């Protein structure tokens, strides 16, 4: 079981103390559940220009079966948590996408090993990186997590000479580089593509991430 760090919830709920000064019972946005979801960015520190608030995770094709995970204002990819109950309980799950090529080979989120462009998060054909998923109860807020990391950040990068700039995603291990934005990736419930997979898991998700008014909620 993975619990989100208190700092993550605090970052999302940082404006709420003044909104509910007499509150005694924590209140959090209502979740539902779905096998399929998209991932929506919530900026918690810094931002880019234009803002990447409420942008969605999608893919930037780089080769046969390989793509970078990037943020865009539209065209989200559909994801789902994958794994047995034991996998999910012991941080062994993966996050796959409905759009692998061919259809029998799913694409999956692959974590990078560092902070260079080539070590950014990818969405590649195959099984992906184990130990990623959507947080589960008793965590009060559903977010995309990676075991052993300190969250995620987004940077505008050019991954190859002549290529257009893209907002690429990185797993945070230490500090966020200057000019980049710390982001929390929130699952938004989505209809699936109709693909059938061996071990899809229900994940907590939100009906409309952009529509959440965080000032209505508080943690203490």
Image (cartoon, rainbow, N blue to C red):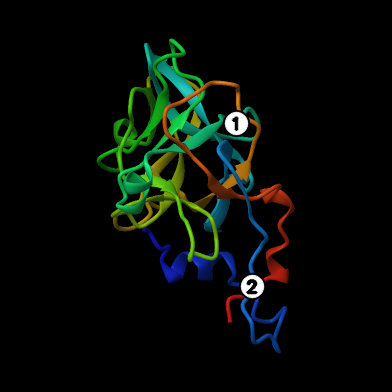
Secondary structure of the residue carrying tag 1 is loop
Q: Residues within 10 Å of mark 2 (few under 14, many from 20)?
A: some
Place residue 12 in its image quadrant: bottom right
Query: Eyeballing the image, is 76 above or below 163?
Result: below
Numbered badge on residue 9: none
Q: Is residue 186 left or right of residue 65?
A: right
At 73% across and 70% down in the image, what residue appears?
216
| 94 is higher (above) or lower (below) than 64 | below
Please say if 118 is above or below 101.
below
Could you tell whether 86 is left or right of 140 in the image? left
Q: Nearer the viewer, residue 175 or 133?
A: 133
Q: Earlier in the sequence, mark 1 or mark 2?
A: 2
- Mark 2: secondary structure: loop
Q: Quadrant of the C terminus?
A: bottom right
Comparing 56 with 140, the one in front is 140
Task: Report the front residue among 125 and 56.
Answer: 125
**Residue positioned 42% across, 28% down in the render:** 198
In the drawing, does residue 68 fall left or right of residue 183?
Answer: left
Callout 1 crowding tier (Cα within 10 Å): few <14, some 14–19, many ≥20: some
Choose top left, top right, bottom left or bottom right for residue 120.
Answer: top left
Residue 130: give x, y in percent of width and height. 30, 40
Q: Could you tell me residue 48's position as x and y percent?
A: 55, 46
What residue is disc 2 on? 15
User: Which circle, 1 or 2, is nearer the viewer?
Assistant: 1
Q: CA distance from mark 1 to mark 2?
A: 28 Å
State the image coordinates of residue 191 (x, y, percent, origin top left). Answer: 65, 32
Q: Position of residue 162 (x, y in %)?
A: 44, 17
Q: Which residue: 30% across, 44% down?
A: 92
Q: Is residue 124 above or below residue 5?
A: above
The residue nearer to you, when weighing 167 against 2, is: 2
- The N terminus is located in which quarter? bottom left
Task: Quickly name the residue at label 1.
Answer: 76
């Amino acid at each position: 079981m993975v619990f989100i760090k208190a700092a993550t919830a605090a970052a999302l709920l940082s404006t709420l103390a003044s909104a509910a000064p007499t509150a005694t019972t924590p209140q959090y946005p209502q979740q539902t559940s779905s096998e399929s979801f998209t991932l929506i960015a919530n900026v918690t520190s810094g931002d880019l220009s234009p803002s990447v608030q409420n942008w969605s995770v999608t893919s930037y094709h780089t080769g046969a079966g390989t793509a970078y995970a990037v943020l865009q204002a539209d065209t989200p990819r559909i994801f789902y948590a994958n794994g047995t109950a034991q996998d999910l309980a012991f941080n062994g799950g993966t996050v796959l996408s409905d759009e692998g090529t061919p259809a029998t080979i799913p694409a999956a989120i692959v974590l990078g090993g560092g902070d260079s462009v080539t070590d950014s998060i990818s969405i590649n054909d195959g099984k992906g990186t184990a130990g990623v998923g959507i947080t589960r109860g008793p965590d009060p807020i559903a977010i995309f997590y990676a075991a052993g990391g300190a969250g995620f950040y987004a940077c505008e990068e050019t991954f190859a000479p002549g290529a257009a700039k893209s907002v690429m995603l990185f797993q945070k291990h230490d500090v966020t580089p200057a000019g980049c934005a710390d982001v929390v990736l929130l699952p938004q419930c989505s209809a699936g593509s109709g693909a059938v997979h061996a071990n899809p898991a229900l994940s907590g998700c939100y009906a409309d991430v952009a529509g959440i008014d965080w000032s209505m909620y508080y943690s203490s």
